[in-house]
Image (spheres, rainbow, N blue to C red):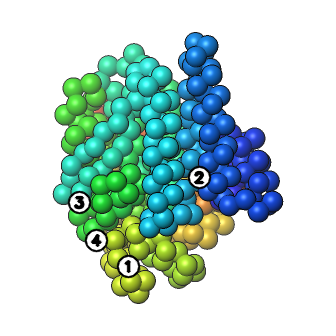
Amino acid sequence: MPVQRLVGNGMDFADVSELYRLVDTGRPWDEAAEELGEQNLARADAALAEGHTATARDWYLFASACFRVGQVPLADTEPRKRELYRKLIAAFGAAGALAEPVTEHLDVDTPAGVVSGWLLRPTEAQNPPTVVIVGGFDGWREEYHIGATYLLDRGIAAFLADGPGQGESRLFHGSRMTPDVDKAFGTVAETLRVDGRLGDRVGIWGNSMGGFLAGLAASAGEGFAACCVNGGTVRPAEILDRYPRFTAKVRPLLGIDDPEQARVAMERYRLTPERLACLRVPLLVLHGRPDRMFLIENAHTLFDAAGSPDKRWAEWPDGDHCVYNHSHEKHVLVADWFADRLSASMAGAPSPRSVASSSRLPKR
């Protein structure tokens, strides 16, 4: 897990440096990360006792990030994974309790099982639009909290979702990714639309394998008004072509123990040209050219085949997977794009006639 991913997704740089140092001395990754998380919890509790709620909230978020990073390499069969996951949920929830409005934990029953998530609402916004944010094989909802704050700053609510087979939905509700996964996100979108505090326009922002899920959901006619694919692909199984060890991530996602059966099952998840032709909502695709997790040509295939008359391509010549190494630049682009596409003035407006604008951002 590179520095840019850890820092860009909410971990304090001092904790990242200390985590690497401790691991280099022989400390197990999960133990070192837990130790740092406990230190941050103590700082948060002390700040809260002194009435410094903003400071306490930050330390709770840093604690949650440490626990989240610590559990990543652990298998589902290891009790330590759930132990650390409970800690990360508790710390994130403690931070959310100090937010205004309070961050809410929601469980949504869907055709593909329970989807657990966090609802973050902007201050003083009446019936704001909402963006569902989803991660991939092992980078799950809390990892994308930083991106959600950019939406909040623009008056947009965010629902950080653990889809079927991810995070809390998998570890504590037994949900697995199945061919009904698009219906799961459709149910989530409908749940948000009927919440009287939110508006009726819902977007979806998928990262890594979650980019595939976002494209799948948006092309299913399940009520999404805009779609962002960051570091995604038309075929998530492509990662197994280059990194066969990633079967260890695929097996628990699908709930299939046999590695070969899991590989075959993962091959069934594809965004075909026929399916992508049904993706008619505004589309933003972001990718880094050197990305070896999901190749840029497969992201191009998704973009080119999408039927949306309003679509934008953004490419970073030096971008890593999910463009973690241009975190702020990526987040402002995505947040501004959603603000433009989900604004009240866009409701019912005809689709822009400009097609497939290709924004290739300069190398920094």
Identify residue type, mark 1. Asp
Element on which disc 3 rests: loop
Let me know if residue 15 appears in the view. Answer: yes
Image quadrant where one finds the N terminus: bottom right
Disc number lying in front (4 or 1): 1
Residue marked by disc 3 = 112
Disc number lying in front (4 or 2): 2
User: Dot 2, crowdedness within 10 Å: few (<14), some or many (≥20)?
Assistant: many
Whole-number angstrom distance, CA of label 4 to CA of label 3: 23 Å
Q: Earlier in the sequence, mark 4 or mark 1?
A: 1
Tag 2–tag 3 contact (CB < 8 Å): no
Q: From the viewer's side, name the closer residue of 5 and 296.
A: 5
Whole-number angstrom distance, CA of label 4 to CA of label 1: 31 Å
Element on which disc 1 rests: loop
- What is the quadrant of residue 64 in the picture? top right
User: Residue 252: image x %, image y %?
Assistant: 40, 69
Element on which disc 4 rests: helix
Disc number lying in front (3 or 1): 1
User: Dot 3, crowdedness within 10 Å: few (<14), some or many (≥20)?
Assistant: many
Q: Is residue 304 left or right of residue 38?
A: left
Q: From the viewer's side, name the closer residue of 249 and 136.
A: 249
Element on which disc 2 rests: helix
Residue marked by disc 4 = 274
At 51% from the left and 50% from the top, the residue drawn is: 84
Residue marked by disc 2 = 69
Whole-number angstrom distance, CA of label 4 to CA of label 2: 38 Å
Identify residue type, mark 2. Val
Tag 4–tag 1 contact (CB < 8 Å): no
